[in-house]
Amino acid sequence: MTRIVSTSPQAPSDVVTDVPATTAADVAAAADAARAAQRDWAATPAPQRSAALTAFADAVSRSAQDLAALVVREVGKPVTEAVGEVARTVAILRYYAQQALDPLGETYPPATGGLSFTVRRPRGVAGLITPWNFPLAIPVWKTAPALAFGNSVLVKPSPDATGCALRLAELAAGVLPDGLFTVLPGGAETGTALVDLADVVSFTGSGAVGRQVAVAAATRGIAAQCEMGGLSASVVLDDADIAAVAKQIAYAAMGFAGQKCTATKRIIVAGDDRREAEFTDALRTELDALICGDPADAGVAVGPVISAAAAEKVRDAVAEAEAAGGKAITRATDGGPGHFVVPTIVTGLEPDDPLNTDEVFGPVCTLTAVPDTATALALADATSYGMATSLYTHRLDVVTSYVETTRTGMVKVNAPTTGVDFHLPFGGEKESGYGGREQGKAARDFYTSLRTVQIS
Ligand code: NAD
């Protein structure tokens, strides 16, 4: 029997979770139970569904300390961010508890008398496939709207974050009806089995897997939403305040060891040589100021990466970039027994260097200097990804014209590429996102389907 084992990235001998993988037969049984639970849940009055989600939020809130510690231990997230993730998880549940009470449709002027209106209905069983880097927030930002609008949920978490997902299931068990929220530990096979049985699928993870999920869902004719990788750019234009911007960008690139889909992976600086030198110096200072080490220690910004394989990928990518002529700016780290990688910024690479075209999920980022604004903005969009772009400028005309032309899902102005407000629609374009936005009010459209009703 396949086992799903997660270990602590900072202390790899610490086994956090060791459970059997969910077989295809068990996924089918869970889907049957979820379907039965969903029928009752959809018929439950909205105020009761709202109250149940609030109770779930309360349960998570009561366990906030334990949950944050588990996030630190299982995925190596710095404790300050882990505490923030738990708070956000609670807030998301409370937000969607209220949305359960929102209007479900619209009335229209009828063409020939009578009544014309739309009404949204739940899709059924939502299959949610999640990555490890936001082990509570991502499962919950999918689960909360799914439940609020009357669906049931089957979550297939990343093997590396199984412990966090199972803890959520324990908390849900005390407050939600049986079968409504079930966690299915497993790897690719369990995920595939889930896509084969769910009524709607929401996936977050790498592009390679997301594309397979999208194809499988399309083949079955079910709605799918895939949030995938990113190669987000921070663009520093010639009116930006270099010292303030360098600090923000250093954290956006290296915080949580660069393991966020919105992490800054490319820094683009517009201006002359003097400005490039000034920015590079400021960035080097900020890189040195980041505290690296045990993510359980308060103040640490950069912990380990998730696995030995991930660490090797980062080191290989840097070595290849250096071989191609790039120059690495690094900083010393204390290291330790875990999967620690030295945070690195590589300068002097061509735009088509692999480090500028392919996502490397770790504390590595490129820095490219260009002469002017137009070149900087064109370069920001010159990848197959389209997750987030940060523009550091006070020129509103530049911002508005970029928003018109970019194919990036999220544009931040004088703010880091990282950081997500759960009440706003979230998602990328091109290879970063497929099938509609998550969170905010956008989630309702995804977890419901529309009936158009005409009464003559
Ligand atoms: P991953 O693609 O390896 O795994 C994601 C999930 O898919 C896991 O639960 C995995 O077990 C499952 N899976 C693997 N093969 C499958 C298959 N054939 N069918 C169905 N499910 C399958 O990603 P990861 O390493 O866990 O996460 C890192 C990636 O996630 C990065 O690329 C990152 O950019 C991306 N990410 C994107 C967002 C976003 O919102 N766009 C947010 C966080 C992370």
Image (tube, rainbow, N blue to C red):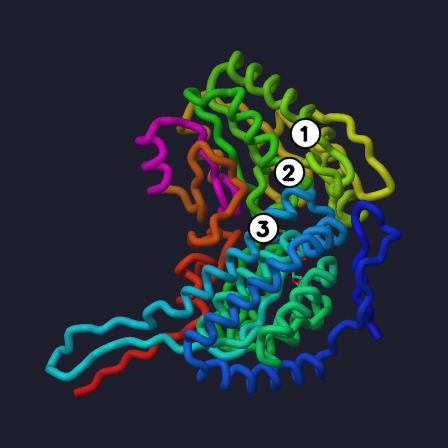
Which quadrant of the structure image shows residue 36?
bottom right
Residue 268's place in the image compared with 51, above or below, is above
The earlier-in-sequence mark between 3 and 2 is 3
Ligand 1 within 8 Å of disc 3? The answer is: yes
Disc 2 marks which residue? 255
Which quadrant of the structure image shows residue 341?
top right
Query: Residue 361's spot in the image, x, y percent?
Result: 67, 45
Disc 3 marks which residue? 229
Q: Quadrant of the C terminus?
A: bottom left
In this rendering, does residue 197 appear at all?
no
> In the image, which disc is placed on residue 290?
1
Query: Residue 196's spot in the image, x, y percent?
Result: 60, 77
Q: Is residue 395 left or right of residue 283?
A: left
> In the image, which disc is placed on residue 94?
none
The earlier-in-sequence mark between 1 and 3 is 3
Contact between marks 1 and 2 (CB within 8 A): the answer is yes
Farthest residue to the top: give it. 274
Residue count near mark 3 (Cα–Cα under 10 Å), binned few <14, some 14–19, many ≥20: many
Local secondary structure at mark 1 = loop
